[in-house]
Image (cartoon, grey):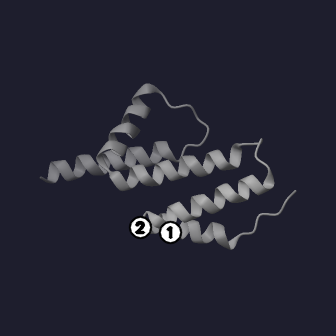
Amino acid sequence: MAQLGRMSQTLLQRTRELMVREDIPLGAKAQETINKALAQYRTLATVYRFKQQLKGIWIRTSNSHASRVQQLQTWCTEAKQTGIRTQEDSAQCLRAYGLREV
């Protein structure tokens, strides 16, 4: 039983290291590690999916200011509905910031 706990902990540590690496292409083995953890941990999969959605909102240059604000508001609403504290905190933090048109 202790062995299983250590294996899970190792998997989660490795997954975290891979997930925080932004814009660095992942190899097949690294992607497999992430996919294994996402399949095993539903909450982690939800948080990761929301992270990817938020990243997509920010990098889409074709979005107008109004469209981006609407997408962020939708993201915040959906994040709060997950019941996951980190998602709720992120949504609250984003709502505290006002987007200014540049």
Q: Three-letter amino acid code at disc 1?
A: Glu
- How many numbered discs? 2
Is 11 on the left or on the right of 3, as rendered? right
Name the residue at 15% across, 54% down: 2
Q: Three-letter amino acid code at disc 2?
A: Gly
* Image height of 29 relative to 11, above or below: above
Is 45 on the left or on the right of 22, as rendered? left
Earlier in the chain: of badge 2 and badge 1, it is 2
Q: Residue furthest right?
A: 102
Q: Mark 2 near mark 1, Cβ–Cβ under 8 Å? A: yes
* Image height of 24 relative to 99, above or below: above
For residue 76, what is the image quadrant? bottom right
**Which of the two residues, 77 or 9, is positioned nearer the viewer here?**
77
Neighbour tally class for label 2: few under 14, some 14-19, many 20 plus, Cα within 10 Å: few
Residue 22 spot, x, y in % from top left: 59, 43
Q: Residue furthest left?
A: 1
Neighbour tally class for label 1: few under 14, some 14-19, many 20 plus, Cα within 10 Å: some
Residue 73 spot, x, y in % from top left: 64, 62
Q: Residue furthest top?
A: 28
Q: Which residue does the numbered mark 1 point to in the structure image?
A: 88
Q: Which residue does the numbered mark 2 point to in the structure image?
A: 83
Spatial CA span between label 2 and label 1: 7 Å
**Which of the two residues, 56 or 78, is positioned nearer the viewer here?**
78
Is 102 on the left or on the right of 96, as rendered? right
- Give SS at disc 1: helix
